[in-house]
Image (cartoon, rainbow, N blue to C red):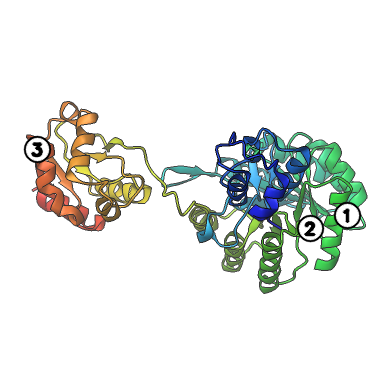
Amino acid sequence: MALTGLQIQKLLPKTNCKECGSNTCLAFAMKLAAKKADLSECPYASDEAKQVLGAASEPPVKLIELGPEQALKLGAETVLYRHEKTFVHQTALAININDTDSEEKIEQTLKDISSYVLERVGEFIRLDMVSITNKGSDTAAFVAIARKAWETVKRPLILRSSNPQALIEAAIAVKGSRSVIASANPQTADLLCACAKENNHVLAVTASDMDELVQFTAKLKSDGFNDLVLELPSQSLSQRFQLRSLARRTALKDNYKPLGYPFISFIEGSQIDDDLFDTTFDAVTEICKYGGICVLPSFEPAQLAPLMTLRLNIYTDPQKPIQVEPKLYAIGEPKPDSPVFVTTNFSLTYFIVSGEIENSGISAWLLVPECEGMSVLTAWAAGKFSGATIGKFAKDIQLDSLVTTRKINIPGYVAQISGELEESMPGWSVMVGPQDASDLESYIKARILK
Ligand code: SF4
């Protein structure tokens, strides 16, 4: 449970020495309660205060780090709904390979996973993990495929088997990958927990029901092992949705540690086209509703593109718009006398406008001043996209010496800035473009290429 300011004050020295920058210990305690200060700012905090406040300030969902450099992070979430603050670590997407698949199919899937990259609003998005499922009876084959996957893809794995011995051998074979061993139950816990500890892996845990699961994770934690992800005991999508929401709510609102871990889900599919809708629907639920790791049954680019785009949207901080760097962009291969357009540095706006210019078939310059990532009308209303600010930016980057054109095309929504812009850019004339970027192509044909 989060501590109140008064509870925190009782743990502080109460000397009001002001060295933390607050006038009183109580004021500092209030800042700590609101997570606007850090206890390290008080040089006189006792060991007891550090211990109690340290535990209270742990995120309600544990941070789990995967991969050799621990670069893939899960958990550390603090809110139930994205709009309350932000979701922190996006759902990791993995592709499953069965050890019973043909050699050619395994080769091809590993190749596909390695090379897959999707570009969205200037970000290059790749798959995070590979899952190897032990379906056959040949442990050596399972271990060999796990090793091959790790050596080929160099991303953390999920090793999945109901045979603890196969999991142990595979975990040793990919030591150094900091992967997930899936899944331990109360019967296999001792063996697999020791294996995860010795080989620096994370353990997925499951149980037959929620009561058993919370007792299980609480015991593992009290035994000193806390690098866990939870595979919830659910049969259907609706049950998973319900249990997941319940578990996340309990972890966050009651700071209930036995459920304070990221979740892992395996989406089962028969890998035929008819299944694509159902498996995509399952994965959408994972991404929107607290999925930590979502294992997809096969590599399907038609499924991955919308899922990754959705994930980007859900896990973008709603208080920090995605921005592009303010500068003069070349669209195509513009020459000094090519047309000049201007828009804001909100990524979505930039990519839509640049895409429409590109689609029109011309090369052009796109001037993108600093607008704190706001869209055109918002930036204009906030005074960040005015004639004066655009003019100043053009001067700062010495636009006059970079291009010989002396006409600048502004978005139709801010036609009212044209007079001020002409004053700020002596020698330039302003052309008012369309309000919507989708009309840029016809505007270019009618006003620029005429
Ligand atoms: S530095 Fe510590 S003791 Fe001094 S006022 Fe701040 S909280 Fe109180």
The residue type indicated by label 2 comes to Pro
Give the quadrant of residue 438: bottom left
Q: Nearer the viewer, residue 290 or 386?
A: 386
Residue on which the image places disc 3: 428
Q: Of the numbered discs in the image, which one, if any, rests on residue 219?
A: 1
Question: Which residue: 78% across, 42% down?
Answer: 48
- Give SS at disc 2: helix
Q: Earlier in the sequence, mark 3 or mark 2?
A: 2
- Give SS at disc 3: loop
The residue type indicated by label 1 comes to Lys
> Under 8 Å from ligand 1: the CB of mark 2?
no
Question: Which residue: 49% across, 51% down?
Answer: 317
The quarter of the rendered structure image containing the N terminus is: bottom right
Q: Is residue 140 visible?
A: no
Q: Distance between the Cα atoms at labels 3 and 2?
A: 65 Å
**Cβ–Cβ under 8 Å for marks 1 and 3:** no
Question: Which residue: 92% across, 47% down?
Answer: 191
Q: Nearer the viewer, residue 31 or 9?
A: 9
Q: Of the numbered discs in the image, which one, if any, rests on residue 258?
A: 2
**Residue 205: x, y in percent?**
81, 55
**Residue 221: x, y in percent?**
84, 50
Give the quadrant of residue 295: bottom right
